[in-house]
Amino acid sequence: MSKPPIQRYDVVAVVLHWTMALGIIVLIGVGLAMKHADLPKMRVFQLFQLHKSIGVVILLLAVVRLAWRLTHRAPPLPETMPALERTAAHAGHVLLYLFMFALPLSGWAFVSASPLNIPTVLFGLLSWPHIPFLAELTDKAPVAAAFKLAHDYGAFALIAVLAIHIGAALRHAFKGDAPLSRMSLSGGRKENAK
């Protein structure tokens, strides 16, 4: 008896997933380097601009990804997965979507409310505006501090959720009940052809 074909995500969903995953990993690395590495101030400034640039790209891709997800149904989770794990998987995906929006928006809000008023220039090429009502505040410091705190703690929460997501994906791949090929460009073709 042959296995049923693996139901996979479409190419657009896969490309968005892996592009954003790479961007988020780079953002985490750059963010940690900015805050914890002993770097010259000019290097920190350059990393800050890179962090903001990639963050804006992630925000824009998140909009595209959410629109795609709302108009293209995800493949169902395998029937062999216990109900609790299926619920946890759905909750984890909702959390990831929330972070894909909340972190770039809180970072943008922090930069917009910052008393330093440092402009954002995406990849050194394109000016990105501050959020107008935050940029025009008379007492920016406490608002900027609140958004910075939300962004910092949100980043650590995202790291925890990502660790769980990656761990769960690997666990299910090793168990064979939810193969990683569901989210690959080529891995599922051979399996589906059998």
Image (cartoon, rainbow, N blue to C red):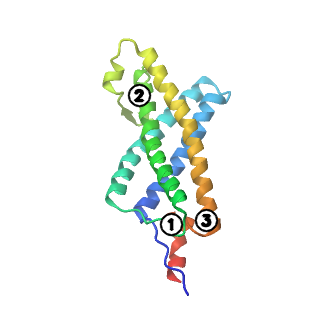
Please tell me whether mark 1 or mark 2 is closer to you in this view. Answer: 1
Q: Which mark is residue 173?
A: 3
Q: Note whether residue 165 is visible.
A: yes
Which is nearer the eye, 158 or 33? 158
Residue 139 vertical placement versus 49 (above, below): above
Determine the residue positioned at 41% across, 42% down. Answer: 59
Query: Hey, which residue is sitting farthest right in the picture?
Result: 38
Residue 35 x, y percent position in the rendering: 61, 28
Dot 3: element: helix
Whether tag 1 and tag 3 are in contact, CB under 8 A, the answer is no
Dot 1: element: helix
For marks 1 and 3, give the CA distance.
10 Å
Question: Tag 1: residue type?
Answer: Arg
Horizontal relation, residue 135 to residue 153: left or right = left
Which quadrant of the structure image shows residue 122?
A: top left
Please give the residue where the numbered disc 2 appears in the rendered image: 109
Query: Hey, which residue is sitting farthest top in the picture?
Result: 138
Whether tag 1 and tag 2 are in contact, CB under 8 A, the answer is no
Determine the residue positioned at 41% across, 66% down. Answer: 10
Pick whichever of labels 3 and 2 is earlier in the sequence: 2
Residue 30 x, y percent position in the rendering: 58, 37
For marks 1 and 2, give the CA distance.
36 Å
Question: Tag 2: residue type?
Answer: Ala
Which is nearer the eye, 18 or 102? 102
* Mark 3 residue crowding within 10 angstroms, few (<14) / some (14–19) / many (20+): some
* Mark 1 residue crowding within 10 angstroms, few (<14) / some (14–19) / many (20+): many
Question: Tag 3: residue type?
Answer: Ala
